[in-house]
Image: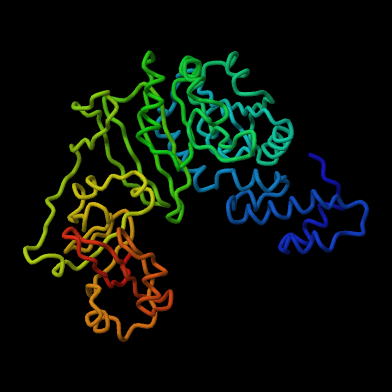
């Protein structure tokens, strides 16, 4: 990728400025490619937040805004790298220790995933992205092969690989978002027979909007004549925002499915097995063979419990609430609230922990008694008839501060406010 010196100088001089203002100001220097300059400035600013190690590297050329927003963050790419390392035995001679990314894109996932393998092939059908990726891989000193080809065509002649990675495009021809596996491009379900014939294992990056159980069942149904099955599901969040659904397909299932709920450095993992009572053999149930604790509940009710816990986004997405009760000395406040109570302070609970200061009903007198000295609070509602904004208005509280109020409906149908202070 050739960017002339005048344009590069402009980028360096204005790299921390507002791109919209720069576009309005324009440039009188005819040698400056303003469109490319603004693209690079915006790309560098996004990279500082999303790809910090690339942002520090000279010579990286950034794609248009949409590609930058759609690419993985460095944090999630590094997680995939560690996952790849964990499933490929050290010194393995399987296949040729070859990694192939069949949907290369900007190349962020490829860059980190490929470093777990001796041979690396990047495949992308967009010629401009291929040219950009090849330039950047050279700048990053990554030795690899770049192929400009569509997924299906390349796959027919692809050598046997240790790992194949796919991140299907989740937009249709009209630019609208799609979520189902069959609606993405390429259609992984159609390619599965050839993929499993060509690779020891597959890693799929799918929309976090998908239900993981349906995704697993759809894929396993297509794999019914193969030895391959979905063996691991990873729900990956960053700063409590769900980013990716990763599925690993290989021949090592042992009758169980591993589920990992990841949020930053926290990982809650458990195992599922197919239900023996499933009418169609596609229902997954918690395999309760891991470490368990006996849930301790007081005889006098929730007033005696000291701590409230809110699972992180990945756990909420997974829906593995029974597993939390089995693993920790905590129990669900009600089946629809997904909030947990405990008399213990649990340091490794996968989510946020709060000390309960008081509990109030919606009775006006009790509300006045419990909240009269309070001016602001962070309000969350779970299975509650009012929205957070409606409740804040009713309670006449500003947003923010060190107090957290969780409004929910408990098991007997009563509406309660849990007034708390954050502990973790």
User: Which quarter of the figure is the C terminus placed in?
Assistant: bottom left
Q: Nearer the viewer, residue 391 or 288?
A: 391
Residue drawn 53% across and 30% down? 183
> Does 7 sit left or right of 245 as displayed?
right
Q: Is residue 279 left or right of residue 10?
A: left
The structure residue drawn at horizontal position 60% and vertical position 26%, both measured from the top left corner, is 121
Give left or right: position of 78 versus 221: right
Which of the two residues, 18 or 224, is positioned nearer the viewer here? 224
Residue 113 place in picture, x, y as percent? 52, 35
Indicate whether 412 appears above or below 190: below
The x and y percentages for residue 311 are 32, 55
Q: Give the residue drawn at x 41%, y 30%.
A: 248
Q: Residue at x 68, y 48 (%)?
A: 65
Toward the viewer: 305 or 349?
A: 305
- In depth, the one of 418 and 409 nearer the eye is 409
The N terminus lies in quadrant: top right
């Amino acid at each position: 990728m050739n960017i002339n010196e005048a344009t590069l100088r402009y980028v360096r001089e204005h790299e921390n400025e507002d791109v919209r203002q720069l576009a309005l100001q324009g440039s009188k220097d005819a040698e400056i490619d303003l469109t490319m300059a603004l693209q690079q400035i915006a790309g560098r600013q996004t990279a500082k937040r999303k790809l910090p190690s690339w942002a520090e590297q000279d010579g990286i050329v950034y794609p248009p805004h949409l590609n930058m927003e759609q690419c993985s963050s460095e944090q999630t790419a590094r997680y995939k790298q560690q996952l790849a390392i964990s499933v490929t035995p050290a010194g393995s001679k399987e296949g040729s220790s070859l990694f192939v990314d069949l949907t290369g894109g900007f190349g962020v996932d490829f860059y980190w995933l490929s470093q777990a393998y001796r041979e690396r092939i990047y495949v992308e059908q967009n010629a401009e992205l291929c040219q950009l990726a090849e330039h950047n891989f050279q700048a990053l000193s990554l030795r690899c092969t770049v192929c400009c080809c569509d997924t299906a065509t390349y796959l027919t002649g692809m050598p046997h690989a240790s790992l194949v990675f796919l991140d299907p495009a989740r937009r249709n021809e009209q630019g609208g978002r799609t979520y189902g596996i069959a609606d993405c491009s390429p259609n992984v379900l159609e390619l599965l027979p050839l993929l499993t014939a060509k690779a020891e294992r597959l890693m799929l990056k799918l929309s976090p909007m998908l239900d993981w159980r349906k995704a697993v069942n759809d894929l396993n149904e297509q794999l019914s004549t193969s030895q391959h099955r979905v063996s691991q599901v990873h729900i990956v969040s960053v700063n409590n925002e769900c980013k990716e659904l990763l599925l690993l397909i290989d021949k090592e299932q042992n009758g169980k499915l591993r589920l990992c709920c990841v949020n930053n450095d926290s990982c809650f993992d458990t195992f599922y097995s197919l239900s023996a009572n499933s009418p169609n053999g596609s229902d997954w149930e918690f395999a309760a063979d891991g470490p368990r604790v006996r849930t301790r509940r007081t005889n006098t009710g929730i007033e005696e419990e000291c701590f409230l816990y809110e699972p992180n986004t990945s756990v909420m997405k997974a829906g593995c609430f029974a597993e939390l009760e089995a693993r920790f000395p905590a129990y669900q406040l009600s089946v629809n609230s997904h909030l947990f109570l405990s008399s213990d302070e649990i340091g490794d609970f996968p989510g946020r922990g709060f000390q309960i200061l008081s509990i109030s009903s919606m009775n006006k007198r009790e509300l006045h008694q419990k909240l009269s000295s309070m001016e602001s609070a962070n309000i969350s509602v779970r299975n509650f008839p009012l929205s957070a904004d409606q409740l804040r208005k009713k309670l006449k509280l500003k947003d923010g501060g060190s107090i957290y109020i969780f409004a929910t409906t408990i098991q007997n149908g009563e509406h309660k406010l849990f007034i708390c202070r954050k502990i973790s």
